């Protein structure tokens, strides 16, 4: 099943982001088979991230919740909130970018 995950960061968390960014990227890289798309979300291209968006392939919503709990951005306390939603692609034949 496919899921979208939306993270909201705590206000003023930029220093945590900078400190843990490389560990977070390495963590994501190890999970490319499961986390199909990942990236930060911002109001403007040059503004600080407000959170992140992932597309995840997993067996269940509970598997998704277990997945992000070991992410360095989660374990360092940077994330304020997370939403996990089931996702149905409109065009099944399209691959994810």
Image: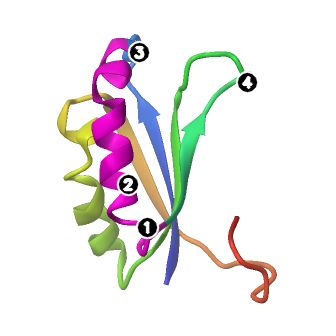
Q: CA distance from mark 4 to mark 1?
A: 25 Å
Percent x, y for residue 47? Answer: 65, 16
Of pointers 2 and 3, the one earlier in the residue sequence: 3
Q: How far separated are the C-alphas under marks 1 and 3?
A: 25 Å
Per the image, label 1 sits on a secondary structure element best described as: loop
Residue for badge 2: 28
Mark 4 or mark 2, which is nearer to you? Answer: 2
Query: Is residue 50 found left or right of 89 in the rendered image?
Result: left
Q: CA distance from mark 2 to mark 1?
A: 6 Å
* Left or right side of 36 for 66: left
Upstream in sequence: badge 4 or badge 1: 1
| Mark 1, residue position | 32
Label 2: state its secondary structure: helix
Label 3 near label 2: C-beta < 8 Å?
no
User: Mostly what secondary structure, the magenta segment?
Assistant: helix
Please tell me how crowded label 4 is: few (under 14), some (14-19), or many (20+) other residues with Cα within 10 Å.
few
User: Measured from the top left, where is residue 60 in percent x and y?
Assistant: 35, 80
- Compared to residue 14, the image places residue 53 above or below, namely below
* 52 and 37: which is toward the camera: 37
Residue 89, picture quadrant: bottom right
Name the one closer to the observer, 35 or 69: 35
Per the image, the residue denoted by label 4 is 45
Mark seen at residue 14 = 3
Magenta-colored stretch includes residue 16:
yes
| Farthest bottom residue in view | 93
Read off the magenta span.
15-35
**Magenta stretch encompasses residue 19:** yes
Mark 4: secondary structure: loop
Looking at marks 3 and 4 on the same chain, the residue that comes earlier in the sequence is marked by: 3
* Residue 71 position (above or below residue 33): above
């Amino acid at each position: 099943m496919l899921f979208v995950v939306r993270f909201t960061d705590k206000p003023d968390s930029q220093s945590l982001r900078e400190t843990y960014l490389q560990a977070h990227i390495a963590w994501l890289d190890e999970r490319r088979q499961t986390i199909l798309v990942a990236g930060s979300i911002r109001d403007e291209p040059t503004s600080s991230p407000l959170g992140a968006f992932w597309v995840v392939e997993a067996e269940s919503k509970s598997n998704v919740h277990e997945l992000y709990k070991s992410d360095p951005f989660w374990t360092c306390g940077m994330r304020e909130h997370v939403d996990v939603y089931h996702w149905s692609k409109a065009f099944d034949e399209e691959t994810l970018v």
